[in-house]
Every structure is written in C-alpha cells, then in structure tokens.
Amino acid sequence: MPLPNRVSPDGSLFADPARGLFYGNRGGRFHDPRSHAVPTRLYANRQWLCCVLSFKGRSRKVWGQGYTELFFCDEVTALAAGHRPCMECRRADALRYRAALVSGLGLSETPLFPAIDRRLDAERRIGRAKRLHQLEADALPDGAMLASEASFLALRGDAGLLWSPSGYIARRRRPTGAVAVLTPPATLSALMNGYQPSWHPSVTAFA
C-alpha cells in the first residue's frame, strides 16, 4: 500500500500509486514512523522544498525515523502547494527561481532563502488551512494552479488542464475573471518573470 505522502496542489497529503516526478520535504519529520497515518500536522518548519528523485546515489527509508519524504506529480504541483526548488540538489533551478522572484517583486536586494521561505509561508497557508488568492485569471502566468469546484486546474496557454495524481487528464477552456489561485503570489511573480517549472509529460497530449 502506498504511503499518504503524495502532495496535492492545495498542499494536503494523500495515498496514491503514482509517485510523481519530484520529491521533497517540509523541513523535518512530522509523520508517525509507526502508524504511517496521515499526519495531523502537515509541516515541520517553513522550509518547504522540491527536490529531484535521485541525488548522488543516496538511499532513504521513506517515512522512517528521518524527515517526512513527500512526492509531487510535477513541479507545477509543488509550487502550487507552496514549495520551492532545493538549493542542494537543484541549485541551478533554485537560483533561477530566486532571480525571477527578485525581478518580479522588484526587490532592491537579493534575499537569502530563509527570507523567501518566510514569505512563502505567509502566502501559502492560514494556520493549517491553504490560503487562496483571489486574482484575475487574465493576469496569471502559465504554471499557476487554480482551485476549481472539486478539482484543480493548471493554466497553460489558452487552457486550464485538469490535474490528477498521475498527470493532466483533460483540457478545459482557460477561465476568465476572478479565480481562486493556489500558487503563492511570490511564486507567481517568479513564473511571470522567466522561471520555467517542469511539467508532467502528460501536458503534451493537450498541446
């Protein structure tokens, strides 16, 4: 049975056979190594990372005594949930993300990653609940993720792609007007200013 360590675009955890393309953590351990039940607390600290699945041949026992390992369908999903690229295993991506964020936000100085983590933490949640941002759809970049009725839509071109744990499964017309956005505004700024996230290959079916 798969562990409940798959991450949905709203940051919640669930179990599914699809492991996804990326791996990550939320700064430490918040699962119970004995029961492997869905945790009541969904993070250890503000450092929410999106990592590669394989790095320097390292091997871990998932949901053992170490930190809580998480899996994402793709990077678009991870960014929507409030994660950012890891500086250890994805250094080049992390630096590109930060540079795009600095440009998008018009910052006069380049912040250290802990400062970015504090900003993302304020933007991604209200207590334990996911924070939604009411924004105009026409102003959103590709890679923004929306909460739409009982589903999630990722914006790409003139479409909203219906999300599933194993990839994108349907094409919808791109929404207009005010929409509920899951992706934190700081990350939206990075997406609008050149950061290119990795998409699940299923998007090619809707090109």
Image (cartoon, helix red, strand yellow):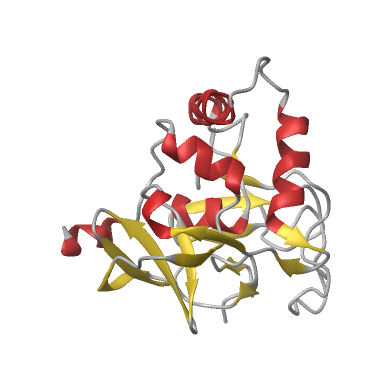
91 sits left or right of 112 in the view:
left
Q: Residue at x 52, y 38 (%)?
A: 189
Q: Is residue 135 visible?
A: yes
Q: Is residue 26 visible?
A: no
- Figure quadrant of residue 180: bottom right
Q: Residue at x 62, y 29 (%)?
A: 87
Residue 163 x %, y %? 39, 70
Marker count (numbered)? 0
74 sits left or right of 157 in the view:
right
- Looking at the rendering, in which quadrant would you find the N terminus? bottom right
Residue furthest top in the image: 109
123 sits left or right of 21 in the view:
right
Q: In the image, is residue 153 above or below residue 84? A: below
In the depicted view, which residue is nearer to us: 114 or 137?
137
Q: In the image, is residue 42 above or below residue 57? A: below
Residue furthest front in the image: 177
Residue 60 x %, y %? 65, 51
Q: Residue at x 61, y 36 (%)?
A: 86
Residue 99 x %, y %? 53, 23
Q: Residue at x 50, y 28 (%)?
A: 100
In the depicted view, which residue is nearer to us: 29 or 47?
47
Residue 97 x %, y %? 52, 31
173 sits left or right of 107 in the view:
left
- Looking at the rendering, in which quadrant would you find the C terminus? bottom left
Q: In the image, is residue 7 above or below residue 194? A: below
